[in-house]
Image: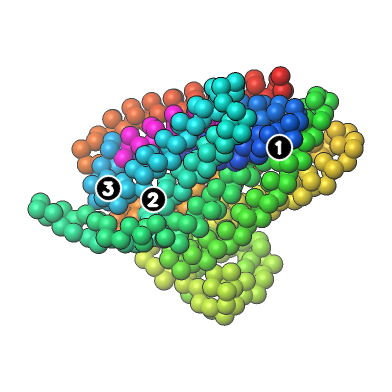
Amino acid sequence: MDVLTLSRWQFAITCMFHFIFVPLTLGLSILTAYFETRYVMTNDQVWLKMTKFWGKLFLINFALGIVTGITMEFQFGMNWAEYSRYVGDIFGAPLAIEATMAFFLESVFIGVWAFGWDKVGKKMHAVSIWLVAIATNLSALWILLANGWMQKPVGYHLVTDAAGRVRAEMIDFLALLLNPYGLIKFFHSVTSGYVVAAFFVMGISAWHLLRKNELVFFKRSFRIAAIFGLVSGLLVLMTGDFHAVEIAKVQPTKFAAMESVWETQRGVSMSLLLVPDEKNERNSVAWINIPKMVSFLAFRDPDSEIRGLKAFPKELRPPVLPVFLSFRLMVGLGMLMLLISLLGIYFSGKKDFEDYTFFLKIALFSLPLPYIAGQLGWVLAEVGRQPWIVYGVLKTADAVSKSISTAQVVASLLGFTILYGGLAVIDVFLLFKFSRRGPS
């Protein structure tokens, strides 16, 4: 494999490892803050035990998320130097704000929260975890605004330096800040993180309820997580719909690949059973059609025109099968998780909830579902943008470092893979070790 392919694999691996930890941090920070607020309001010791137990798991996940996030940034200089030179003036701004504002805020107050139990008052201690939760979500905002700019570049112009090299230069920071693609992506991503946290709490609570451990504690945890999961799942569904509309407007190739639309036409139907045939530029199976649904979902007009993949040169189309499958599987898992959350609210209201072993086992084994859906979402977002690293501006092939060798990328790829694999093992071990103990 060449430097470009290896560099893409390395960045994909590090991003996907990092995104194991990020969504849980986003959601579990909110839940922990809620638990502690209820403790402050009621002085109920069960709420305090919930705060400490779930907060401990939050801290483990938070620490590993920081480590995996830092190593990602090395690659902008190592593997993607041309990208950094071309768009660094723009891409660097939100990342710098994220580091100096959000990251420092969460780093300071997570220390107050972790070590201040007997040193600050109850209210101040609860405020500190809320500040951590807010800062964690603000951190996601700046990073996703940066990614949103890559998906829909705004507020820039191209300039040529003294050496004759072209680069992008920011002329309107407000345009980046208010970029609808980035804002929708932010809300869609963080709410999906809340679903991860909800299913994490539901899964661990189900494990303990199956063993009849701390019934009051884990029944309460499960019910709150199920409600949180249902509300968050509905928000994911709503923001995902908005996101699809934005994609249809600004990334027509990605939208066509998502729905496997080959011919430009009006009133495009949605096929519930669809098998793309990329080699022959058609769909080999298209059964159970809903008339005009794709056109309606894309532009809120059942007779609107959808540009098919054949309207674009082959070299400007994304790989259809991974984009199509990622989208369909993500949506399917999302619907399944909504159903599980709804059933969780219903069953957790039963006095003998711990005896509903079949459903508790479903909840336990559903714990990985939102993780898988989140990873599929990023495959859709990033693979669907290809061959562009900055859509319509800079191709991925032109963004890779020119001075790096294949041997160097192989070495760093192996190093990162081993490091991240080790961190994943440590994370699973620590989370399993502390979660199986239950509240102390």
Amino acid at pointer 2: Ala
Instruction: Determine the image quadrant of residue 287.
Output: bottom right
Residue 9 covered by magenta stretch:
no
Q: Which residue does the numbered mark 1 point to in the structure image? A: 41
Image quarter (top left, top right, bottom left or bottom right) of the N terminus: top left
Of badges 1 and 2, nearer the viewer stands 1
Q: Position of residue 119 (x, y in %)?
A: 56, 22
From the viewer's side, name the closer residue of 341 and 335.
341
Looking at the image, residue 253 sits to the left or right of residue 123; the answer is left
Q: Where is residue 15 in the image (x, y as percent from the top left)?
A: 45, 39
Give the mark, 3 or 1, whose residue is nearer the N terminus.
Answer: 1
Above or below: residue 294 compared with residue 356: below
From the viewer's side, name the closer residue of 264 and 416.
416
Give the residues drawn in magenta, as a range. 58-76
Q: Is mark 3 on a helix, strand or loop?
A: helix
Above or below: residue 257 compared with residue 2: below
Q: Distance between the residues labelled 1 and 2?
A: 39 Å
Q: How far apart are marks 3 and 2 (CA)?
A: 11 Å
Q: What element carries label 2?
A: helix
Looking at the image, residue 235 sits to the left or right of residue 244; the answer is right
Q: Position of residue 342 (x, y in %)?
A: 77, 50
Q: Secondary structure of the magenta portion, mostly?
A: helix
Count neighbours of disc 1 (C-alpha within 10 A) and say few if under 14, some if 14 to 19, many if 20 or more. Answer: few
Q: Do the residues labelled 1 and 2 touch (CB within 8 Å)?
A: no
Q: Which residue does the numbered mark 2 point to in the structure image? A: 146
Q: Which residue does the numbered mark 3 point to in the structure image? A: 88
Give the mark, 3 or 2, whose residue is nearer the N terminus.
Answer: 3
Amino acid at pointer 1: Met
The answer to whether residue 194 shows anywhere in this view is yes
From the viewer's side, name the closer residue of 350 and 82.
350
Q: Residue furthest left?
A: 162
The residue located at (55%, 28%) in the rendering is 113
